[in-house]
Image (cartoon, grey):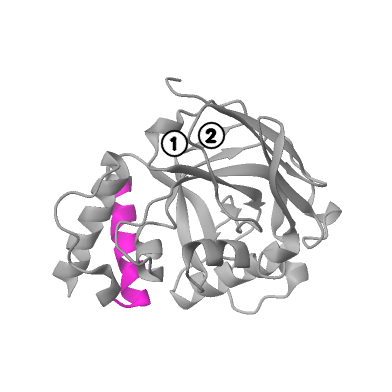
């Protein structure tokens, strides 16, 4: 079995860097379990760290009905965030450097203490957040196997490709984590919007799910980690030069330019 997982890890690592799946679509990713998919993800992480990248946090994916309908999947998953793919506000993005470039609006939570355990109370989770910023998550919006599966989503780290983080930081005490409206605009035109409550009932529910999941796998959410807990809206595709604006009420606005050739 390890040989199969190792081969899948090599394939998903290669697909991330080369933006293509080399050779046949095998072994079938649907043949492995969810636990084995996370083992593949861990092996991919090892390979990326060996290439000089650094794990700087976690993402939670497939958290809203909009995303689940778009993917045709129903289970939430987690993946890692990596440096140098986390960039500050003002970064320009070449959308052609991604496979079917797509974005999600995200709350970016900076974690101020180690979190370990299951069913932690919401007050404890909120107290653990140092600050909150607006983020734009970047995706390689491509499932190599058909139909899409939770196993592939996990192996690929949630089709995550990068993150842009806004400079403005607010205290979690200022937020309800339920009523904040997320909105996405392309070249000034409103594309989609929805409240934070669409994310598992609120981003704190998602954060709790992540801590539970890590704890059950014998790990913890470390102090200093960035966490993006998911989006209340579906992915927005970027297939031409675009000024993209993401706003989260009470948190701020983040504008980024997607241009071919930058």
Residue corresponding to mark 1: 84
- Spatial CA distance of label 2 from label 1 is 7 Å
SS state under label 1 = loop
Q: Which of these two is toward me, 237 or 196?
A: 237
Q: Which of these two is toward me, 3 or 106?
A: 106
In the drawing, does residue 199 fall left or right of residue 170? Answer: left
SS state under label 2 = strand
- Image coordinates of residue 173 in percent, x first then y, are 83, 55
> As displayed, is residue 249 above or below residue 187?
below
In the drawing, does residue 15 fall left or right of residue 191? Answer: left
> As displayed, is residue 164 above or below residue 47?
above
Image quadrant for the C terminus? top left
Q: Are marks 2 and 1 in contact (CB under 8 Å)?
A: yes
> As displayed, is residue 131 above or below residue 24?
above
Residue 62 seen: no
Name the residue: 64% across, 56% down.
Answer: 233
What stretch of residues is rendered in magenta? 32-48
Residue 87 badge: 2
| Residue most extreme to the top | 261
- Image coordinates of residue 165 in percent, x first then y, are 61, 38
- Image coordinates of residue 211 in percent, x first then y, are 57, 69
Residue 136 badge: none
Rendering quarter of residue 255: top right
In the drawing, does residue 104 fall left or right of residue 50? Answer: right
Q: Which of these two is toward me, 47 or 63?
A: 63
- 47 in magenta: yes
């Amino acid at each position: 079995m390890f040989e199969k997982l190792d081969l899948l890890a090599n394939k998903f690592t290669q697909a991330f860097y080369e933006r293509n799946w080399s050779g046949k679509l095998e072994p079938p990713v649907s043949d492995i379990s969810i636990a084995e998919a996370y083992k593949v993800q861990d092996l991919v992480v090892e390979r990326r760290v060996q290439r000089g990248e650094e794990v700087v946090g976690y993402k939670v994916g497939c958290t809203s009905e909009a995303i689940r309908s778009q993917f045709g999947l129903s289970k939430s998953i987690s993946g890692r965030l990596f440096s140098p793919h986390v960039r500050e506000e003002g970064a320009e993005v070449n959308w052609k450097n991604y496979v079917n470039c797509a974005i999600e609006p995200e709350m970016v939570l900076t974690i101020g203490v180690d979190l370990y355990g299951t069913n932690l109370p919401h007050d404890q989770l909120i107290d653990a957040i140092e600050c909150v910023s607006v983020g734009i998550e970047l995706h390689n919006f491509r499932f190599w196997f058909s139909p899409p599966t939770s196993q592939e989503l996990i192996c690929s780290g949630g089709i995550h490709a990068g993150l842009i983080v806004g400079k403005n930081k607010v205290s979690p005490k200022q937020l309800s984590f339920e009523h904040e409206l997320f909105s996405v605009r392309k070249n000034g035109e409103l594309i989609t919007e929805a409240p934070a409550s669409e994310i598992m009932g609120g981003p704190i529910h998602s954060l709790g799910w992540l801590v539970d999941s890590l704890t059950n796998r014998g790990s913890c959410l470390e102090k200093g980690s960035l966490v993006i807990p998911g989006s209340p809206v579906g992915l927005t595709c970027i297939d031409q030069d675009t000024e993209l604006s993401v706003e989260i009420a009470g948190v701020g606005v983040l504008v980024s330019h997607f241009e071919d050739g930058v």
